[in-house]
Image (cartoon, coloured by chain):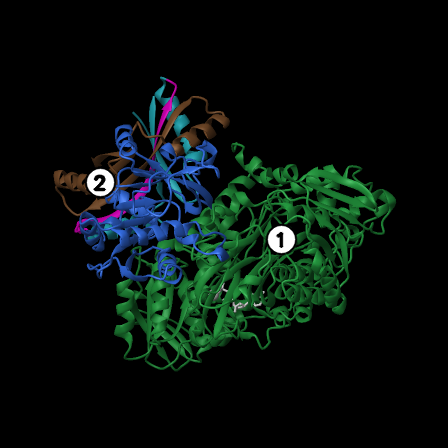
Chain colours: A blue, B green, C brown, D cyan
Amino acid sequence: MKFAVIVFPGSNCDHDAHYAVTQVLGQQSALIWHKDTDLQGADVVILPGGFAHGDYLRTGAMARFSPIMREVQAFAERGGPVIGICNGFQILLEAGLLPGAMLRNRGLKYRCEHVHVRVETTDTPATAGAYKGQVLTIPIGHGEGNYYAPPDLLKRIEDNQQVVLRYTTADGRLDDDANPNGSVNAIASVCNDRRNVVGMMPHPERACEPALGGTDGLVILQSIVKALTTA
Amino acid sequence: MSIDPQVLERHGLKPDEYERIVAFMGREPNLTEIGIFSVMWSEHCSYKSSRVHLRTLPTEGPQVLQGPGENAGAVDIGEGLAAVFKIESHNHPSFIEPYQGAATGVGGIIRDIFTMGARPIALMNSLRFGALDAPGTRRLVDGVVAGIAGYGNSIGIPTIAGEIVFDPMYAGNPLVNVFCLGISKASDIIKGVASGVGNGVYYVGAKTGRDGIHGATMASAEFDEKSAEKRPAVQVGDPFMEKLLLEACLEVMKTDALIGIQDMGAAGLTCSTTEMGSRGGAGIEIDTALVPQRETGMTPYEIMLSESQERMLLVSKQGREAEVEAIFEKWDLHAVRIGHVTDDGMLRVKHQGQVVAEIPNRALTDEAPVYRRPMESPAYLPEAQTLDLETIVGSGSPEKALATLLSSPTIASKHWAYRQYDHMVQTNTMNLPGLGAGVVRIKGTDRALAMSVDGNGRHCYLDPKRGAALAVAEAARNVACAGAKPLAATNCLNFGNPERPAIMWQFGQAVAGIGEACRALDVPITGGNVSLYNETDGKAIYPTPIIGVVGLLEHADRLLTRRFQRSGDVVVLLGDSHCEVGGSEYLARVHGLVRGVPPSLDLKAERALQDLLVKLAEARLIRSAHDCSDGGIAVTLAECCFGSQGIGVEVSLMAVDAPSSLQVDATLFAESASRVVVSVDGSLVTEVLQSAAALGVPARVIGETGGNRIRLAVAGQIVVDVATADAERIWSQAIEQVVAQKVA
Amino acid sequence: MRARVFVTLKPSVFDPQGRTIVEALHTMGYGDVGDVRQGKYFELEIETTDSAKAKAMAAEVADKLLANPVIESYRVEIV
Amino acid sequence: MRARVFVTLKPSVFDPQGRTIVEALHTMGYGDVGDVRQGKYFELEIETTDSAKAKAMAAEVADKLLANPVIESYRVEIV
Ligand SMILES: Nc1ncnc2c1ncn2[C@@H]1O[C@H](COP(=O)(O)OP(=O)(O)O)[C@@H](O)[C@H]1O
Ligand SMILES: [Mg+2]
């Protein structure tokens, strides 16, 4: 299976994702420069975390104009799985490949820590290997992860079960204190209508090895492999 | 043009220094040349007051690949790899504009590391502020922490450890010291040299503006009412530009098309051209008109002295220019040829072909003034060192004293700060912040590096020599507590005005203490930074040497943290305890006193202790290790419980020899050095004690982990009995509670 | 010509920065400040002497890049 | 009354955000946009009907909280 990890200027979790895919998952992965126009036959595309274009202006705002994004869009339209992690999620929102927008964390500060997220649907490539209600402990690291959608859009997202992960307590309860950034409905991850494009604020690639303090991120990464092999 | 005294004063040049300049040049320098001399001969660049002392530091060892003199030091970490690291201060800029000052400090030290061909993989910082609840501190703390986060997070280098101390002595002069470490192949270390006549000198990165002109001289002058006027335009950091530079430079370095490369830090183009030329025994000729400029109408003087951030100077091999340019283009950076290497040892600056400055490199570097400034033991010392223990009445309530210490912002959890730092990016961080030394694994090997920055200004104020040695010992001990063998050190020396003999004495003593400790512990100094004139209105900070030590874990999986791992483990105290309360946090917090002499330090015993820790970790004989420092053994034991899911501890301590009313407090809170609390599986205790005995390290079983309370007995009497959760709440919320209050 | 673009969060979107500022102002004694909204402000130098053209271009740029229509609205002025 | 406060970096201070936006605009084909400076924009509701008073208060607030006088300058308008 072949992953493509897109490298925008300012991406800084590109190598982390690439490492997790190749060294932990044992899959193939190519780092693809944002000015390229070819996804090199990838089966799955990852938009990694970081600060594309410095995140100056708005997170993800400039990266969506990169040449490779046309390919990513076409790939998504063909039903190919696209996973945006953190800044990748923000880019997918700005590019209109996912619904909603990102605001600054309600505490106005960057937060880097482990959080608990509950799997809300297994019908996405990022959660195909999880079970519904499963609580994963995965790190976040962001200053703008306060997910927002206007009420009507939010209703549609919820009705369609496009919420993939929600911030909860360790035992899976919704609790305002467990919501690190103020996201509406504690949303940590959403997918598109067609369910092949998923954006998430938590960093699964940071939780793939016991030496780094946890392996729950593997549930996400292995889901992708599973979704593709059973598709 | 004739140079009048005012011009010299504005440039911080003394009349006799000017005479030396005229003598070297054989003529009167023009204004551009004066500007160049002024920055190169400033304290910041020339180390004119400190050099005679720094020379005495040990800098060699089989592990040292690069000692002081380059952009950063480097040590051999095995498997053909090198760790490249250095610490730098950005105190003055951070006082003026906390966010940008701290951010550009981070940017500067990162450049020093990747300039050497190393990929930066870890950051640490050491910060000093006034009392947390004092007016003005919050603005500084908020800004500095956000600035460090803003730069480090964006560029994608994890901030994995550090320290923050709050003390009124830093109210008018905060300290912001930043450490960066990178990894490269040992054979691929690149130096800041220019050589090969005719080779192109390239400029790459941000355009040059008028920002920070005279930053280097500012860093060399103390603050006073008038400094507001001298304030240069503040430099704004651009982490995105630096991320591009970092990636592009590392890619260019892989091609071997480069002769040398150097960042433009303090004194910008002036310092980089001069230093590269002088290291390579060559000269450099540039034309300032070719330098990319952000503002119009800039003069050669301004271009040479600008301290705009995120700029690099490099010398490319002839015939390889196109390759170099292409890589920078890929990253949307434009490498511009601004000159070439010559063989005459001169810094020659042209402007549209006209020579505007021409100075022998030597005059700017080797021949810069060196001062042996007078030193005199400070008048405050005899009084401050006097501590009559008989007059100090113990707190009477050790539990309350423990709570006071746990809530002291210096001791309390720094979670509020470090959760703003991305400490996990690059997926190497094995020890998250707050668990002791920062630890990162080295991908592709079994190895990991542990690192710690430490310093104690109060100790140094009371005895700079011993205080500085204690800082070296503590940093190395922290690294050893993680199970890593300390390899080498870097240092940042923050002091007041060296023209005052009492300050210079502190400086000399501190350097002597560092030297002694580094020799004894075999951690040579590979580089560092000196920050002088840390004064406001004539009031100096505590003398504050900060030491960064880097150590190696050959097997990353032997890593230890401070946390107790399970109930029922035996708690062993390594090292001896004495009634050493001088300069302690206890004395300051509970009695409001900064007095006495800091704890004694037996360097042989310290070395044995550290060797033991590394051995115990390697043999997997212990489960946790935590050193005793601020707040003494009581705070240490409490911290061992924190974050361990509420595991408690019950210990019984032998009373130290102290006046009776002070005996309990001194036993709990004295800060005797060379002590570590370890937890051990019951079946391994004998082996641990035997290993300790073999190395001559005092070791004693003091209790057991378990339950959910912290129960401490002194001389058989329970004196502290608190729920772990309560103690942890106090400790973890102390800073948050203060910073959560709205700023007025 | 110079164009100014003001980007503000839509009224329905909660503005955490604005709220924090109001709270700070209240503790500082500025009880008369009832509400604060924070936005972004851009000054664009546009190489044209035709102010209608400048305005159109600024609006296009705001639409495509400077503002996110899901959460923000913008206003353009030519000076 | 409503006050608007514009906070901009002083002209001598480097604006990396503005520069990055210009570059993005250029790659998007907006070569006519010569320069961009990014600033902050605040709308304050002030409970008074005296516009001079509102202006004075907005300026005071800008001075103390909204602008960083070391690198930024501000301008106040009453609407
Ligand atoms: N306290 C110190 N101990 C050892 N070496 C030092 C110390 N301070 C500075 N140095 C060394 O002196 C050299 C010059 O430092 P320098 O590069 O001028 O700092 P900067 O990066 O600010 O230009 C460096 O190699 C540095 O490691
Ligand atoms: Mg340097």
**Residue D24 visible within the image:** yes
Q: Which residues are magenta?
A: D28-48
The chain under label 2 reads: C
* Amino acid type at image mark 1: Arg
Q: CA distance from mark 1 to mark 2?
A: 52 Å
Residue with the mark numbered 1: B562
Magenta span has D47?
A: yes
Instruction: Left or right? Give the position of B581 relative to B194.
Output: right
Residue type pointed to by label 2: Ala
Residue tagged 2: C62
Residue at 29 percent across and 42 percent down: it is A123
Mark 1, secondary structure of its residue: loop
Q: Quick one: A93 or B39, which is closer to the camera? A: A93
Q: Position of residue B24 (x, y in %)?
A: 49, 76
Name above or below for residue A123 compared with residue B478: above
In the image, the residue with mark 1 has its CB under 8 Å from the nearest atom of ligand 1: no
Could one spot residue D60 in this view of the protein? no
| SS for callout 2 | helix
Q: Are there few (<14), some (14-19), or many (20+) residues within 10 Å of tag 2?
A: many
Question: Is A59 in the magenta?
Answer: no
B638 left or right of B388? left
